[in-house]
Amino acid sequence: MLDRKFIVDNAELVKTNCTQRGVTADIDRLVELETQRRARLQEVQELNRRANEVSKTIGQAKDPAERDRRKEEGRRLREEKDTAQADHDRLESEVAAIQITIPNLSHPDAPVGVDDAANLEIRRGAHAPREFDFRPRDHVELGEKLDLIDLEGGSRTTGHGFYFLKNEAVLLELALQQFAVQKLITHGFTPLTTPDLAQDRILEGIGFLPRGPETQVYSIEKSDLSLVGTAEITLGGLYSEQIVEAERLPVKLCGISHCFRTEAGAHGRATRGIYRVHQFTKIEMFAFTLPDQSDAMHQYLCERECEIFDDLGIPYRVVDTATGDLGGPAYRKFDLEAWMPGRGERGEWGEVTSTSNCTDYQARRLNVRFKHKGEKGTQFVHTLNGTAVAITRAIIAILENYQQSDGSIIVPPVLRPWVGKDRIGGA
RNA sequence: GGAUGGGUGGCCGAGUGGUCUAAGGCGGCAGUCUUGAAAACUGCUGUACCCGUGAGGGUACCGGGGGUUCGAAUCCCUCCCCAUCCGCCA
């Protein structure tokens, strides 16, 4: 969320940003309520002060009548305070309710536009899309022929949107995990396995809305836990309520997790195969930085994503996401879209990874701060996240780009140490 | 899951209803002394928020939440976490 004082002092700027993001939020109302809230807060504090003053004199008062008189005054002051406090608390929750709907500010270079049509291609990967001398199959067909993906089984045991990976697809999943984690370790990331459940307040801190009609999140009944949609949630939550020494920043983490998404409202949108599923495995990068490091870290995370897909030999493009498509927490977001030859009529770009700079938006809600040694005061850190590998989409890209005319799949050279063979299917 | 003991300021640790909302120690910072350093001595040493141009003043915070009271680290309720022992288990 944005800083409340900042919103009050920059109401017009925030309004404009909301418009560019396609978000409706009543900024004027927030300003009005916040002004009232501060006045109430002052009353509460003043009443508290006077009540404390009275309390202190009671212990010393010897005369019983005098003590009773002062007790009565103390009681009256506390009652007045309680009334003002209740007022204040009501205003506080009203202000907070508006505040959490306000999206982050936007990077000045982010393309302005209400949806992904305004996304701006900024770069291509090292490998150009392949020219096929046959009609490329899509991953569903390939997965079926080679007995790699069992969608029907997933549907039978769990429901639509679930799947079993089988045979070499399992090896591909493990190989992709190994490849990505090993690479990130050499880049100084600390690897972690992460809980697949998190408390709702952590989900909210990251910017998810657990529970509610439009939630993307599965929640656990009779508890405050939800299945995570991404390790971004747990990795960001790892430092919640912490004050980090500035010298220890930036912190670079890489987490392995399962991701669970209801995909509510996504019906009919690219639901074929394992492109949009309710559960998948992901290797996620996450960074905590000083405020003036986050732009550079964002480029750095994007470079790691490009490096991984260049090494895998998969063609892709990098897109600078338009303001209306950034979601709530991101200040700027780059997506990697891999070429998927089997998608649509003659192949399409499909999102495989994404990296966001969330500046202090998540840190403020999660309360992650830093301080310089020997200096007074703290500031909020900046948080960034990026997908190293989302397994299902990476597998789609591998199967479709590495397919041969006989229906076999060449294994990308960098994965062969873990897959243990250089070709899936075929002779 | 059962039993017991605990959760206090960066750390250790005292504090069981009111001499200001935390003793004492360690660590850290500054100073005195010293050629320099150490030792010794002196002072300072959290976070958030509010008011104020400023100096400064104030409110809240002793695991979380709620309660009793004029007043709670201290009493009551509840939840969480940690340690040890027992049981169970991959």
Image (cartoon, coloured by chain):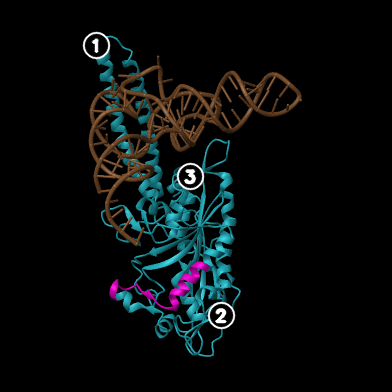
Chain colours: A cyan, B brown
To which residue does mark 2 refer? Answer: A129
* Image spot of residue A352 (x, y percent): 48, 70
CA separation in Å, label 1 and label 2 = 92 Å
Q: Amino acid at mark 2?
A: Pro
CA separation in Å, label 3 and label 2 = 46 Å
Query: Which chain does the residue under circle 3 lie in?
Result: A
What residue lies at 33% left-to-right and 66% top-to-bottom?
A264
Query: Which chain does the residue under circle 2 lie in?
Result: A
- Judging depth in this view, the residue of A8 and A389 nearest the camera is A389
Q: Which mark is residue A6?
A: 3
Q: Is residue A113 left or right of residue A218?
A: right
Disc 3 to disc 2: CB gap under 8 Å: no
Same-chain check, marks 1 and 3: yes
Q: Is residue A368 left or right of residue B30?
A: left
What residue lies at 35% left-to-right and 62% top-to-bottom?
A216
Magenta segment includes A23: no
What residue lies at 51% left-to-right and 87% top-to-bottom?
A404
- Residue depth check, mark 3 versus mark 2: number of the one nearer the observer: 2
Q: Residue furthest top?
A: A63
User: What span is in magenta?
Assistant: A156-178
Q: Between disc 1 and disc 3, whose residue precedes?
A: 3
Query: Which chain does the residue under circle 1 lie in?
Result: A
Q: Which mark is residue A65?
A: 1
Q: Amino acid at mark 3?
A: Phe
